[in-house]
Image (tube, coloured by chain):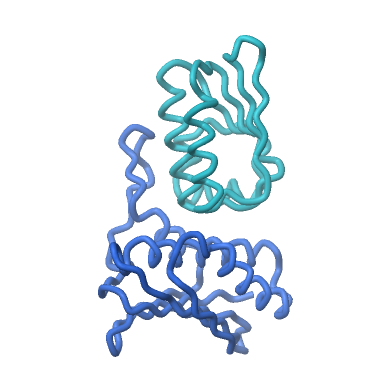
Amino acid sequence: MNFEKNDDGTVLKLTLDKKLSAVTADQLEKALEKELVGVKDFTIDMAKLSYVSSAGLRVLLKAQKYVNQHGTMKIINAVPEVMRIFETTGFNEILNISK
Amino acid sequence: MSVLNIDAEVSNLDKVLAFVDEKLESYGCLPKTQMQIDIAVEEIFVNIASYAYNPEKGSAAISVETQEDPLAVIITFTDGGVPYDPLKKPDPDVTLSAEKRQIGGLGIYMVKKSMDNVTYEYKDGKNILTITKKF
């Protein structure tokens, strides 16, 4: 995972790769607790992500709820396999996903 | 049939997936199907690691085999933890808003939706969960 933040710390872009599994979701959750403070515009690029388990969905939901309080979060470039997981679980209605 | 006996710990997830992937690749499984199977394996293994023996520790056995006509992979998870049938858990309401959403039960729901067959039995003091996926 890679984070890019603008100078005043309000715009954050996260690039995920490979897997969001129980192991990597735990790492992401810890990283987001620090990185999301003060962020108003949060983008997650999923172009290189091909695997999301329920542990990953839990962290995405937590991030969305947190950012909803004072800003916006959007997901870009989700691949069809990952979109299918979002659709099966109804997460396509919860998360802000750009086509 | 190949069997992996491993401590039921979330930190062993990558070892479990490597074991399953090696078998799936030898069968010529498509990457997309392999990803669905891997996620199902994760959900079931993480459930066993999190709840079967808690707070004690224990092990799980994972076996992988194929059947012909229709060509399918059958993966069986066996643990000696507390009797628990995850298939009895009601499906989560996937239409709720972010604020009302409960995350419990989502993993086994994903397994049920993505696999062709999922069965549970409790036999000789063991939980036995079997998933079947055509490929």
- At 32% from the left and 83% from the top, the residue drawn is B126
Seen from the viewer's position, the closer of residues B102 and B115 is: B102
Residue B79 found in image quarter: bottom left
**Chain coloured blue:** B
- Residue A63 lies, in percent from the top left, at 47, 32
* Image coords of residue B48 (percent x, y): 38, 67
Quarter of the image where the C terminus of chain A is located: top right
Q: In this view, does A16 lie above or below A70?
A: below
The chain that appears cyan in the image is A
Front residue of B53/B1: it is B53
Q: In which quarter of the image is residue B1?
A: bottom right
- Rendered residue at 44%/64% (across/down): B9
Q: In this view, does B99 lie above or below A59?
A: above
Query: Furthest residue to the front?
Result: B56
The quarter of the rendered structure image containing the N terminus of chain A is: top right
| Residue plotted at (53% across, 16% down) | A40
Asked if residue A43 lies left or right of residue B126, the reply is right
**Quick check: A46 left or right of A94?**
right
Expressed as whole percent of the image width and height from the top left, the position of residue B46 reads 44, 62
Q: Where is residue A10 in the image (x, y as percent from the top left)?
A: 57, 14
Residue A33 located left or right of residue A1: left
Q: Is residue A26 above or below residue B111?
A: above
Picture mark count: 0
Residue drawn at (52%, 82%), measured in percent from left and top? B63
